[in-house]
Amino acid sequence: MIEIELEKRYLVKKLPEGLGALPHKEVADIYLPADSRHPVLRIRKNGDKFEITKKQAISDGDKDDHSEKEEHTIRLSREEYDSFAKINGKRVSKIRYDCVSNGVKGEIGVFQNDLKGLVLVDFEFTDSKQKAAFKMPDFCLADVTQEEIFAGGMLCGKRYSDIEARLNELGYSRIG
């Protein structure tokens, strides 16, 4: 399945009230190839669903707009995922909470393990007009959509300390 994803990503400055009561799931990603600076191929456990996805920014001349990506996704069975999960890849895990802000569905990613303390939220849009009109929610600190360092393929395999200098520049305080 090929889709165009319209998305904005924000650093969260404080967890929304009642976060624990929101629907949530464990997300475990394995990015390939392991030796790539920014891998775009991802094997994912998304709650009780499994998939392999290739996601790349749509290029506009010399500039990539990271808010618009071409996404190819193939659903996997549990057995297929378990087989892929043995592959050497860069890993990242988070608890993902569903939310709604300004009428738009979002997913709050509370990172685990080596990135513990990092919280991002992604909002997906139905069209470019909705994306352009969206206002950053109050619980967010900064729009980091265009910052490659906060892409999943760049965060995988990293420690909080690897991105801490940039987080400090943005005025981010570790959560949790």
Image (cartoon, grey):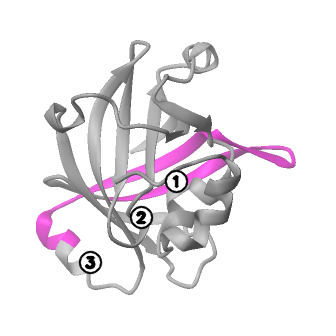
Identity, as a three-letter code, of the amino acid under mark 3:
Ala
Earlier sequence position, callout 1 versus callout 3: 1
Labels 3 and 2: the sequence-earlier one = 2
Determine the secondary structure under disc 1. Answer: strand
Query: Which one is nearer the viewer's eye here, 175 or 48?
Result: 175
Q: Which amino acid lies under the numbered mark 2 shown in the image of this protein?
A: Arg
At a point 57% along the width and 17% down the height, the residue shown is: 135
- Any magenta on residue 25? no
Per the picture, the main secondary structure of the magenta-coloured stretch is strand
- What label does residue 42 carry, if any? 2
For the magenta stretch, what is the residue range? 52-81
Spatial distance from mark 1 to mark 3, Cα to Cα? 19 Å
Q: Residues within 10 Å of mark 1 (few under 14, many from 20)?
A: many
Quarter in which the C terminus is drawn: bottom left
Asked whether the residues under the numbered discs 2 and 1 touch, taking CB atoms below 8 Å apart as contact, a structural biologist would say yes
Residue pictured at 85% horizontal, 44% vertical: 61
Task: Give how far apart the Cα atoms at labels 2 and 1 are.
Answer: 8 Å
Q: Which residue is mark 3?
A: 85
Establish if 145 lies above or below 81: above
Q: Residue sitting at 62 percent across and 36 percent down? A: 143
Checking the image for residue 55, the label placed there is 1
**x and y percent of residue 69 in the render?**
58, 43
**Type of the residue with mark 1:** Lys
